[in-house]
Image (tube, rainbow, N blue to C red):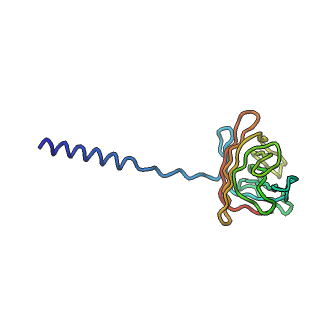
Amino acid sequence: MKKLLTFKVVLIVLAFLVFSCKDKDPVAKKNAFTYDGVTYDLSNGWLLGYGANADSVSSDYDITLYSSGLSIDSLGDFTGTGHMVYLDLNVSGTGSFVPGTFTWSDTRSANTIVYGDFTLDIDTGAVTSGTSGSFNGGTVTVEVSGSTYTVDFKMTMANGKTVEGYYSGPLTLL
């Protein structure tokens, strides 16, 4: 009887351990960026290519991500209200956009980011904006699957603050 009770206790403990060790569902990333503890939505983006760099082995591409209150006019300028993040990337090769990981650099070469900034509370009608800042370091990863671009970034600023964000969706090619 005592052996049967011990066996049941061991069986219950093992069952508890097995079922309590399930991997939790990963939290889905949101199309947004965070600055100074506040999160700002991102809903759209564009990709603009400038062609080959002076090194003849990399190309200059800019990604701009922005919130739903903003739109782009026929000249490529913003209209409306919202927030945006701008990333100046340099891809390997001199043809079409090549996804990858881009690391901050002071010079244009393959798989680098040489400039970036963000602006909050843009209002093109009133010609005003809120907080803005330029980056001086960081990393951007871009993946492409069909027409979906996934952009994951963590940028640093001279004041020690970070701008960290994620966007997954189409980018308008300008």
Farthest left residue in view: 1
Q: Residue at x 51, y 51 (%)?
A: 26
User: Where is 159 relative to 108, above or below?
Assistant: above
Q: Position of residue 171 (x, y in %)?
A: 72, 61
Total labels: the figure holds 0
Q: Position of residue 65 (x, y in %)?
A: 73, 53
Q: Position of residue 44 (x, y in %)?
A: 71, 58
Farthest top residue in view: 159
Is residue 9 at all visible to an observer of this figure? yes
Q: Position of residue 160 (x, y in %)?
A: 72, 33
Q: Residue at x 85, y 56 (%)?
A: 56
User: Where is 51 relative to 85, above or below?
Assistant: below
Is residue 78 at all visible to an observer of this figure? no
Q: Is residue 94 left or right of residue 4?
A: right
The quarter of the rendered structure image containing the N terminus is top left
Front residue of 116 and 90: 90
Front residue of 17 and 34: 17
Q: Quadrant of residue 91?
A: bottom right
The quarter of the rendered structure image containing the C terminus is bottom right
Farthest bottom residue in view: 146
User: Where is 21 relative to 144, above or below?
Assistant: above
